[in-house]
Amino acid sequence: MPARKIIIDTDPGQDDAVAILLALASPKEIDVLGITAVAGNVPLSLTAKNARIVCELAGKPEVKVFSGCDTPMARALVTAEHVHGKTGLDGPDLPDPTMPLQDGHAVDFIIETLRQHPAGTVTLCPLGPLTNVATALKQAPDLAARVQEIVLMGGAYFEVGNITPAAEFNIYVDPEAAEIVFKSGIPITMMPLDVTHKALVTKPRNDAFRALGTKAGIAVAEMTDFFERFDKEKYGSNGAPLHDPCVTAYLIKPELFSGRHINVEIETTSELTLGMTVADWWRVTDRSPNATFIGEIDADGFFDLLTERLANL
């Protein structure tokens, strides 16, 4: 089977970095056509820089990285330095990138790439707020029929929120963009907190990354060392959840995951529940299913895959 062609849309973020590394370490399954940066965990200038840092950490400076939208579609930007540190990649000491940003805007790259490839052959993989993807769909409505699938990290239902009591960060930052994406008719698979909170970097799992002895393995261990202090205190868990790598792991080994095809609506008006992903898990409405909501993960299989692939870098 040929490698799956994808565009990674991201706001790195340590867990975004691990997701990118996993994709770049898996060329037999994943063909990364480009990486598009969006404002989210940290401002755009840093996410565009961090994406290139990660590509160089992977030894893949030839990957095309584009800078995208610096603010949400209708709101002021909310960032998450309290989790990821002031750079977004706090933890390891990584050099500034030498590879350039590509000319042109990320949204234009998404539009042009989807039009250049046969319909149904390119998957979009958003790991942050959905601003770039929604802007592309708004500017070029024909794209909805060309996207093979959107596999995204975002949302929550039984795990409720991590930035407000009701909302997960990526959706909360730009709920209007999320609404456009979830109403697009494109097949969507979502990795909500309900599944990512089961992908915990325990000490033995992090020790396995460090034991690889490679730049990438040590950097991943140092990244999780940094951001786990926040999550372990917040959730009382044995480690930090690796949210975004669930997206790329799903593309490589979907059998590690299970969920339900259900209706998911985005709250865009309530001050109390803004950004909530209202998931009809029990199918109590007559609203049409629009997303596969992943709820379970083989965590041991996930970390085995991640450690095995990081060893390739």
Image: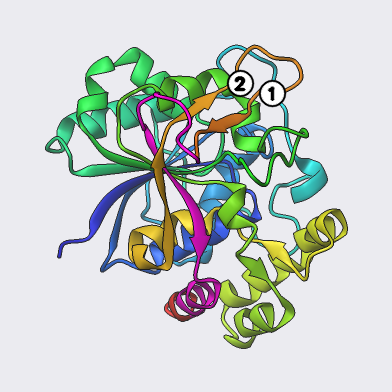
Q: Which residue is at the front of the view, 279 or 56? A: 279
Q: At label 1, which amino acid type do we have?
A: Leu
Asked whether, in this view, residue 200 is left or right of residue 301, the answer is: right
Which quarter of the figure is the C terminus placed in? bottom left
Q: Looking at the image, do the residues carrying marks 2 and 1 touch, with CB atoms under 8 Å apart?
A: yes
- Measured in 3D between alpha carbons, the distance from the residue under mark 2 to the one under mark 1, in whole angstroms, is 5 Å
Asked whether, in this view, residue 54 is left or right of residue 115, the answer is: right
Q: Is residue 56 visible?
A: no
Location of residue 183 by image quarter: top left
Q: Crowdedness of circle 2 by 10 Å Cα count: few (<14), some, many (20+)?
A: many
Residue 22 rendering spot, x and y as whole percentages: 45, 65
Q: Which residue is mark 1?
A: 77
Q: Which residue is mark 2?
A: 71
Asked whether, in this view, residue 134 is left or right of residue 176, the answer is: left
Q: At 57% from the left edge and 31% from the top edge, which residue is drawn?
A: 277
- Label 2: element kind: loop
Residue 154 rendering spot, x and y as whole percentages: 55, 41
Residue 222 rendering spot, x and y as whole percentages: 72, 70
Specify which label sits upstream in the sequence, 2 or 1: 2
Q: At 30% from the left edge and 37% from the top edge, which residue is drawn?
A: 187
Q: Crowdedness of circle 1 by 10 Å Cα count: few (<14), some, many (20+)?
A: some
Q: At 36% from the left edge and 67% from the top edge, which residue is drawn?
A: 255
Question: Is residue 39 part of the magenta span, yes or no?
Answer: no
What span is in magenta?
282-307
Q: Is residue 174 above or below residue 35?
A: above
Identify the residue at the far right of this view: 233
- Label 1: element kind: loop
Q: Is residue 251 visible?
A: yes
